[in-house]
């Protein structure tokens, strides 16, 4: 039996696929993506229960799914509002991937600025996004959208600057926001940590971001990852840690298929 598909069917499928991909691109910049994954797993479990005629499980999942459908617009209210605000804007997201040269320049500028902050005892908090989106923190700060440079970071964290308080958030090689407010971790009374250090721990507990902190009191440099704070590190140690943590964001060098074997032989010499 031969089935003929009208051209409109393919157009319909392409539009729906594009919409789902567009929604994914937006949600990947927020923590809501993890909630969406959980919902999809629940739907998959419901389908399995229906296929194998698991009556009790199917009954429970059906009512739970109904409740979630009602709850999702409430839970995702900020994200849904942002989707409507973003429609029509040409720049929807910022690429976190970097070329090797851009990556090297990024490390140089961050380390240089951090060294200057440390010598001058200027407090600073720099957040570098990896895969988990930080959109909600970018939105509550002051939008910058400028290339990362030591000079710009110095201007932002200058003690008399109105942007001095809060965090700078970097995506790729661009500063997206300054003066952003971050979640502050609850720390035991025995640990003498200021607000910047607790914010660095807090944001890295809820995301895979990397946080660089400079103490205003001592000028010491710290780095936070996965809720763990490494304190009083040198600028060389900072560069090494940033390189290992961020190198996955470096784009592999592009090669033309026809010349690839020749170039590889030349590199092996």
Image (cartoon, rainbow, N blue to C red):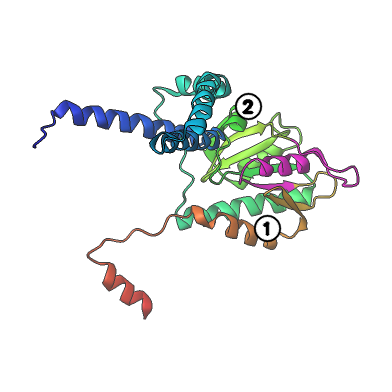
Q: Quadrant of the C terminus?
A: bottom left
In the structure shown, which secondary structural element does the residue marked by tag 1 occupy? helix
Q: CA distance from mark 1 to mark 2?
A: 28 Å
Q: Quadrant of the N terminus?
A: top left
Nearer to me, 224 or 124: 224
**Residue 192's x, y, as percent?**
88, 45
- The residue at 50%/26% (across/down) is 65
**Residue 42's x, y, as percent?**
50, 34
Nearer to me, 124 or 159: 124
| Residue 211 lies in the magenta-colored region | yes
Other residues around mark 2 within 10 Å, as few (<14) / some (14–19) / many (≥20) = some
Give the farthest residue toward the right.
190
- The segment highlighted magenta reads 184-213
Give the farthest residue toward the bottom.
269
- The residue at 32%/32% (across/down) is 18
Q: Which residue is mark 2?
A: 140
- The image quarter in which residue 84 lies: top left
Other residues around mark 1 within 10 Å, as few (<14) / some (14–19) / many (≥20) = many
**Residue 175's x, y, as percent?**
57, 39
- The residue at 55%/32% (across/down) is 32
**Front disc: 1 or 2:** 2
- The residue at 45%/24% (across/down) is 86
Q: Is residue 162 left or right of residue 107?
A: right
Residue 238 is marked as 1
**Residue 142's x, y, as percent?**
61, 28
Nearer to me, 36 or 223: 36
User: Would you place residue 83 above or below residue 97 in this image?
Assistant: above
Q: Along the polypeptide, which appears first: circle 1 or circle 2?
A: 2
Residue 197 in view: yes
Q: Is residue 256 left or right of residue 164?
A: left
In the structure shown, which secondary structural element does the residue marked by tag 2 occupy? loop
């Amino acid at each position: 039996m031969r089935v003929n598909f009208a051209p409109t069917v393919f157009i319909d499928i392409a539009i729906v696929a594009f919409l789902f991909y567009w929604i994914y691109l937006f949600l990947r910049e927020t923590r809501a993506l993890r909630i969406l994954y959980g919902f999809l797993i629940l739907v998959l479990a419901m389908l399995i229960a229906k296929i194998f005629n698991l009556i009790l499980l199917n009954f429970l999942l059906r009512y739970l799914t109904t409740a979630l459908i009602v709850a999702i617009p409430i839970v995702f209210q900020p994200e849904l509002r942002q989707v409507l605000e973003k429609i029509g804007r040409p720049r929807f997201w910022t690429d976190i991937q970097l070329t090797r040269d851009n990556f090297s320049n990024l490390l140089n500028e961050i380390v240089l600025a951090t060294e200057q902050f440390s010598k001058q005892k200027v407090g600073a908090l720099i957040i570098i996004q990896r895969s988990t989106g930080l959109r909600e923190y970018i939105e509550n700060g002051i939008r910058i959208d400028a290339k990362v440079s030591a000079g710009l970071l110095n201007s932002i964290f200058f003690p008399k600057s109105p942007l001095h308080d809060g965090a700078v958030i970097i995506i790729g090689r661009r500063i997206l926001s300054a003066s952003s407010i971050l979640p502050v971790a609850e720390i035991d009374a025995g640990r003498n940590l200021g607000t910047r250090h607790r914010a660095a721990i807090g944001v890295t507990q809820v995301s895979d971001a990397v946080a660089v902190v400079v103490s205003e009191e001592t000028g010491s440099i710290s780095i936070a990852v996965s809720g763990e704070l490494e304190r009083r590190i040198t600028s060389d140690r900072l560069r090494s840690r940033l390189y290992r943590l961020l190198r996955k964001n470096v784009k592999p060098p592009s090669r033309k298929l026809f010349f690839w074997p020749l170039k590889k032989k030349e590199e092996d010499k």
